[in-house]
Image (cartoon, rainbow, N blue to C red):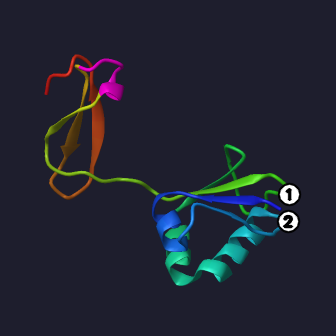
Amino acid sequence: MPVLRLFASAREAAGTGRDEVDGATVADVLSAARARYGEPFTSVLRTARVWVNGEPADGDVAVGEGDEVAVLPPVSGGSGDDVVRHPAAGGSGDSALKRVGDGSGAGALVPLPGGSG
């Protein structure tokens, strides 16, 4: 049976990050998931991308035992313009991530080697 992996808002809508869902194709798996998780999940699915075993996939792609069907909703966030120190940002304790945004609530994290903001 294929393994359904859910991320971000898809995980929140379904209440789980992983499930086994029967189906012979991606479309079958997603149809069963819609029935299982209801409208909140269906709503997220409208804008999500679907990947099978690490590759982008359409609904007609065949899936089987052990295949991983991943639902990846669009991800965005952040606002304002500030710096967050984080050791993983560039490999040293002096590195930082800078939050950048246009004031609309959309934004990104940008690594700043050397750690200055």
Q: Position of residue 78 (x, y in %)?
A: 25, 51
Residue type at mark 2 is Ala
Answer with left or right where residue 17 lies relative to residue 54: left
Answer with left or right where residue 64 lies relative to residue 35: right
Pick the residue in front: 29 or 60. 29
Q: Residues within 10 Å of mark 2 (few under 14, many from 20)?
A: some
**Vertical position of residue 45 compared to residue 80: above or below:** below
Tell me which residue sits at (28%, 33%) in the image: 110
Tell me which residue sits at (86%, 56%) in the image: 65
Whether residue 55 is visible: yes
Which region is colored magenta? 87-93
Figure label count: 2
Tell me which residue sits at (70%, 53%) in the image: 57
Evaluate if marks 2 and 1 touch, with contact meaning CB atoms under 8 Å apart: yes
Tell me which residue sits at (22%, 58%) in the image: 105
The circle drawn on residue 94 is: none
Residue at the disc numbered 1? 64
Q: Residues within 10 Å of mark 1 (few under 14, many from 20)?
A: some
The circle drawn on residue 24 is: 2
**Vertical position of residue 62 compared to residue 90: above or below:** below
